[in-house]
Image (spheres, grey):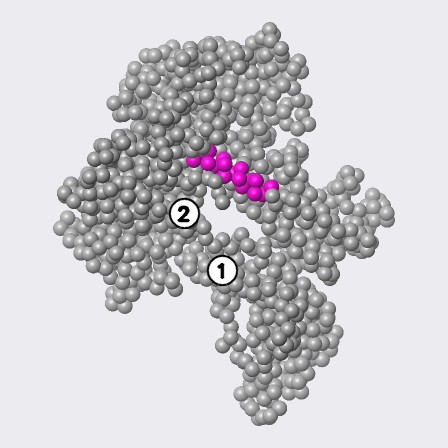
């Protein structure tokens, strides 16, 4: 239990933004009629690019008479009917689709060709602000969403700033963007408490969901909220509060005013008592005062439409809930524990080798014994089964976590864990295969029995190899301690053993023969690349069982000549055998 | 207290006199009435732009580690950043042969005198650097000792970044620095703003704190129209820095903040040492002392905030005027006017101004009070983290002495080196030792991660118990890591994949630097704990019998030298030279030129 208190950091995040020149500069570009910057005119859409030495600002604007409808359209529909695939990178297994505002996205599709050209011109290492006012801001958000694809987990140089813009998507879109904290950090939405456009787009708060950080502004102050639930709560209450009608907000004036006021103390309404508040409660109530521009007596406010205290309580709960949710799966915390499990298995492998069997066959035998007897106190269950299970659960979680991540981040994640993951797969999958074949009834492991996470781990390695280029020239070396590269080696071998059985019965089984020849060649090629652990040559190994049964009908002469002399095995172990 | 008050007044007097002769590098005053007698060394300020900003932005640079070896983060080996022009000016002063500051300090130290370095305005940074220079020379372990110097500044600008502050706290030096700051004095806040935002107004306003100007400390500058812009620009930039840091205090992992940092330039300068904020009511006013650097930063902004926009002209005028009135503020300070806002008080700071007591005189708003609470919370969290780690120390201790101790003994009995035994990895004991290695590594990895995220107290890397434990773990556990690395063949042809380059974990790199810093030793290319890594690498390189490679030859020669040195200091285990050890086997393969080297031959024969 921690004794420390918590805070709501929006109360200090807002002055960080408002006291800088960021918003003034951005608004300056939106409102400037600078003749040097030629606007690009598309269908119903105008944009201009303002380049400075250290920053590029991209502004979107729509024609005044543009009518924004409220209906949503799903990303699947867009893909199937409009041939619009650009949202696909946001979708994952958990979030297969989401919905966006139809009017906004169709405006986008109308200008697709030009916007693609614009996108291709963007230099990702140069800081970029994408911005717009009102519906223009909604388009800016959409455009930024599409730029996220190229943002890795490194330095983010992209920021979308909207001024009084309507929401653009549903809860699923928010969730898709929240998959990466990097992505949601790219959006800053400036909203005045007197804004009218937000009202226009959230008549049904169940349909739309905000994402990114919201900067709520009033004449007296500003505050930030980043938690979408809290933002929605505030947006809805703003609408209720201002039921008497909205003014047109001059964001230029608003931003300038906040900049001037950033060096002044906050206005504290009379009757706001903080003496007995916790830090969290006090920060939220101060935030509400700033966001709603409360200056008058707190008592009077209770009689208006919004109950400030109730709102504060609700927000406090949401913030607490969010901070608890943030504690999530961190694989590096337990990595050392998992290394201990691996060390256990490594020891087991060594022990088996000293018995002349090899850990695959040893484990298979003991599993057989285990299933026939009801006795569970066997030594195997303690030394091997526990670490094997704990490793498996860990890596299943790990792979799932990686797949939940958006593509670019997942790539970085995979590189980090690739070495440990490959080691794990090569060490533990043979045990899994041993269990599978132990009862003597199951077959066709690779197609029917293989757990998905092994497939995924193997795929990662393949992709990594493709990226880096296969490393050559290291084929000949001492392989005494290596793990067999192909973690399914033993499954292939079990299948070969089964086929050997058929061979006795049906001398002319062409299919079985063909498959066996295939296996024979596979073994030879793997040996040639020094990718197989020499433990397969141990006396009690299933591989040797297979070879003894099969060698009479063997076709690959090079393999036969290698297998003919036990001294070759030692030469192979030392990396000294020269394969023809 | 009284004596200290008197000393402070004298230090201020000296600082003002130093301004009057800006061409002299410093002034020395000796006061021998007291015991020990005091030497006050004061520095003049400078108002020229070139003495404040080296470039258009914040003008920071990496500190000169040859003069200030402690001013860095040790484990990550990152030097502190410091204002380049201040550092240059100090270089000028310290390198003067006559009058030689070094000689004066040496004389005073020899006579066991209390040295007080003092400076007003931009004389402050000179006093700070002189103090740090003296501390490095006389207060580091194995140095000559003497009474630690004291540094007193008045309205001094900021000088270094967060690592500067971190390092002074780690060395326990921050208590020697006392900075007096008037509530509205603008000068201590100037470096929050980049030069580009001040431009012309700096030239004009700096007349009032430039000793060479005829408007020095004159009120007339404060009446000019540019003071409004000057005050506003500096305060907005102070708001940027303080609200940024407060966001970090309240929520450590905030990615939105990280994105915004790219678009909003941020001053690197942060306060350090003890700050005493004076409220400006002469001897009636409160003097509020704060040592928590994050809290000081917040107060630097919030105490000079405007109550309403209407106040601006008046406060802007005051912000310059207060730079000149430290004298009246320091006369006859009564003890009851001193308030120390310590950790506990900050943590429980009342949120309403109505019930705020002593801290009220700084005019702190509820938001300011929340930020101060957050600053105290962070310290609290860091201490809690360290407490939790302390509990794990006995765990490591047990694993190290009992389990690995017995393991080493087992091999010693068999007359096999424990490195070679472990590398073979044939016995159940080897396997157990490997598990123990991983258990110890788990705790260390957690420590290093916390350290890198700034989640441990500043003093951590200088804590003798941790340095010692780190050293012992390196000695016993690191050879196992090396053995594992080479046992699994994770190295290939080139040095880029060697243990030292690619395999060595931070849990060994950091403690090595801790020890080197604690003992003020030069950096070792190969630490004793990495002996085996060098042997393995050389063995690999010479496996084809070829030692003709220049680089390999040099490394073999270097290793021979080091083995001699280590053996004489008994830092190298004797089992290295047992017949059949990885080292001896390799040694025998070398050219006679080497393998007949008498010292090592004698070691092997023993």
Bounds of the magenta span?
A: B374-390
Disc number at residue A435?
none
- Residue underneath mark 1: A398
Pointer 1 local density, CA inside 10 Å: few below 14, some 14–19, many at least 20: many
- In this orientation, which residue lies closer to the viewer: A25 or A332? A332
Question: Measured from the top left, where is residue B202 in percent x and y?
Answer: 36, 22
Question: Measured from the top left, where is residue A160 in percent x and y?
Answer: 31, 47
Mark count: 2
Q: From the viewer's perspective, tell me whether residue A96 is left or right of residue B70.
A: left
The chain letter for the residue carrying disc 2 is: A
Residue farthest to the top, as pictured: B33
Question: Measured from the top left, where is residue A271 in percent x and y?
Answer: 27, 31
The reply to whether dot 1 and dot 2 touch (C-beta < 8 Å) is: no
Residue at x-position 66% and y-position 53%: B436
- Residue A320 magenta-drawn? no
Disc number at residue A323?
2
In which quarter of the view is residue B140 placed?
Answer: top right
């Amino acid at each position: 239990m921690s004794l420390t208190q918590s805070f709501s950091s929006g109360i200090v995040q807002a002055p960080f933004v408002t006291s800088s020149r960021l918003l003034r500069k951005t608004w300056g570009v939106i409102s400037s009629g600078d003749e040097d910057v030629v606007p690009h005119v598309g269908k119903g859409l105008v944009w201009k690019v303002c380049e400075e030495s250290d920053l590029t600002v991209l502004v979107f604007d729509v024609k005044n008479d543009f009518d924004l409808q409220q209906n949503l359209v799903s990303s699947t529909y867009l893909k199937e009917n409009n041939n619009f695939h650009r949202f696909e990178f946001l979708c994952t297994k958990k979030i297969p689709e989401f919905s966006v505002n139809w009017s906004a996205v169709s405006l986008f599709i109308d200008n697709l060709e030009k916007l693609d050209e614009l996108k291709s011109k963007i230099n990702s290492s140069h800081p970029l602000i994408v911005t717009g006012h009102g519906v223009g801001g909604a388009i800016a958000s959409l455009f930024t969403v599409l730029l996220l694809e190229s943002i890795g987990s490194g330095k983010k140089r992209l920021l979308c700033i909207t001024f009084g813009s309507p929401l653009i998507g549903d809860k699923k879109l928010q969730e898709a963007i929240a998959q990466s904290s990097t992505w949601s950090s790219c959006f800053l939405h400036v909203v005045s408490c007197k804004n009218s456009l937000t009202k226009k787009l959230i008549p049904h708060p169940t349909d739309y969901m905000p994402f990114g950080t919201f900067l709520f502004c009033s004449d007296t102050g500003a505050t930030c909220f980043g938690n979408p639930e809290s933002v929605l709560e505030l947006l809805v209450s703003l609408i209720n509060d201002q039921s008497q009608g909205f003014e047109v907000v001059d964001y230029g004036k608003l931003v300038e005013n906040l900049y001037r006021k950033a060096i002044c103390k906050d206005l504290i309404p009379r009757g706001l008592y903080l003496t007995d508040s916790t830090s969290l409660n006090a920060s939220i109530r101060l935030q509400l005062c700033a966001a709603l521009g409360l200056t008058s007596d707190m008592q009077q406010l209770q009689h208006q439409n919004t109950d400030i205290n109730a709102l504060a309580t609700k927000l406090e709960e949401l913030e607490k809930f969010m901070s608890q949710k943030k504690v999530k799966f961190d694989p590096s915390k337990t990595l050392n524990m998992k290394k201990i499990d691996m060390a256990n298995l490594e020891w087991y492998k060594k022990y088996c080798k000293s018995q002349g069997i090899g850990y695959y066959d040893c484990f298979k035998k003991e599993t057989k014994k285990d299933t026939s007897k009801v006795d569970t106190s066997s030594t195997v269950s303690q030394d091997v089964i526990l670490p094997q299970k704990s490793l498996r659960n860990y890596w299943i979680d790990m792979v799932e976590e990686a797949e939940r991540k958006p593509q670019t981040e997942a790539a970085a994640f995979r590189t980090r864990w690739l070495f440990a993951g490959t080691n794990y797969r090569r060490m533990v999958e043979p045990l899994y295969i041993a269990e599978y074949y132990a009862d003597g009834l199951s077959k066709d492991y690779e197609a029917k029995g293989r757990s998905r996470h092994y497939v995924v781990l193997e795929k990662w390695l393949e992709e990594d190899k493709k990226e880096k280029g296969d490393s050559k020239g290291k084929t000949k070396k001492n392989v005494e301690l290596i793990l067999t590269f192909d973690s399914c080696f033993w499954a292939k071998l079990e299948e070969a053993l089964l086929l050997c059985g058929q061979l006795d019965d049906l001398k002319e089984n062409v299919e079985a023969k063909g498959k066996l020849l295939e296996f024979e060649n596979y073994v030879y090629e793997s040996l040639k690349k020094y990718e197989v652990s020499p433990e397969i040559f141990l006396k009690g190994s299933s591989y040797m069982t297979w070879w003894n049964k099969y060698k009479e009908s063997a076709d690959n002469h090079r393999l036969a000549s290698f297998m003919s002399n036990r001294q070759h095995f030692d030469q192979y172990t030392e990396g000294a055998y020269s394969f023809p | 207290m009284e004596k200290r008050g008197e000393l402070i007044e004298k230090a201020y007097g000296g600082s003002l006199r130093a301004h009057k002769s800006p061409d002299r590098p410093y002034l020395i005053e000796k006061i021998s009435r007291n015991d020990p007698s005091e030497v006050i060394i004061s520095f003049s300020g400078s108002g020229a732009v070139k003495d404040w900003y080296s470039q258009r932005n914040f003008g920071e640079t990496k500190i000169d580690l040859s003069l200030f070896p402690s001013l860095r983060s040790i484990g990550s080996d990152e030097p502190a950043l410091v204002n380049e022009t201040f550092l240059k000016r100090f270089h000028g002063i310290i390198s003067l042969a006559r009058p030689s500051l070094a000689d004066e300090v040496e004389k005073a130290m020899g006579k066991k005198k209390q040295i007080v370095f003092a400076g007003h305005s931009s004389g402050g940074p000179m006093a700070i650097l002189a103090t740090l220079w003296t501390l490095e020379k006389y207060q580091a372990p194995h140095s000559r000792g003497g009474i630690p110097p004291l540094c007193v500044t008045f309205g001094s600008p900021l000088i270094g970044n967060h690592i500067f502050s971190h390092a002074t706290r780690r060395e326990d030096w921050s208590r020697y620095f006392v900075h007096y700051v008037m509530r509205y004095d603008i000068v201590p806040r100037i470096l929050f703003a980049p030069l580009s935002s001040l431009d012309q107004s700096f030239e004009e306003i700096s007349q009032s704190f430039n000793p060479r100007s005829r408007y020095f400390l004159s009120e007339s500058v404060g009446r000019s129209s540019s003071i409004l812009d000057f005050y506003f620009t500096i305060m907005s930039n102070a708001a940027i820095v303080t609200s940024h840091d407060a966001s970090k205090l309240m929520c450590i992992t905030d990615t939105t903040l990280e994105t915004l940092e790219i678009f909003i330039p941020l001053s690197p300068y942060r306060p350090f040492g003890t700050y005493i904020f004076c409220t400006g009511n002469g001897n009636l006013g409160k003097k509020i002392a704060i040592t928590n650097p994050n809290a000081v930063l917040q107060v630097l902004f919030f105490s000079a905030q405007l109550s309403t926009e209407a106040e601006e002209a008046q406060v802007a005028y005051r912000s310059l005027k207060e730079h000149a009135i430290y004298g009246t503020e320091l006369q006859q300070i009564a003890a009851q006017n001193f308030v120390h806002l310590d950790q506990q008080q900050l943590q429980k700071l009342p949120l309403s101004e109505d019930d705020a007591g002593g801290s009220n005189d700084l005019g702190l708003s509820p938001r300011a009070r929340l930020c101060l609470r957050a600053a105290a919370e962070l310290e609290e969290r860091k201490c809690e983290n360290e407490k939790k780690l302390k509990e794990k120390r006995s765990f490591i201790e047990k694993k190290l002495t009992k389990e690995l101790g017995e393991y080493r003994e087992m091999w010693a009995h068999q007359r096999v080196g424990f490195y070679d035994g472990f590398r073979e990895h044939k016995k159940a004991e080897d396997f157990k030792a490997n598990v123990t290695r991983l258990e110890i590594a788990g705790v260390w990895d957690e420590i290093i991660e916390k350290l890198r995220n700034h989640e441990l107290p500043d003093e951590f890397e200088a804590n003798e118990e941790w340095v010692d434990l780190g050293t012992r773990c390196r000695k016993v556990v690191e050879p196992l890591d090396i053995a594992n690395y080479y046992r699994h063949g994770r190295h290939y042809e080139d040095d880029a994949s060697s243990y030292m380059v690619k395999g060595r974990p931070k849990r060994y790199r950091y403690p090595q630097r801790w020890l080197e810093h604690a003992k003020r030793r030069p950096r070792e290319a190969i630490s004793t704990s990495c002996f085996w890594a060098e042997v393995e690498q050389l063995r690999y390189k010479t496996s084809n019998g070829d030692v003709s490679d220049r680089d390999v030859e040099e490394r073999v020669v270097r290793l021979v030298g080091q083995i001699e040195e280590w053996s004489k200091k008994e830092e190298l285990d004797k089992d290295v030279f047992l017949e059949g050890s990885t080292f001896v086997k390799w040694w025998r393969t070398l050219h006679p030129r080497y393998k007949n080297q008498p010292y090592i031959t004698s070691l092997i024969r023993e």
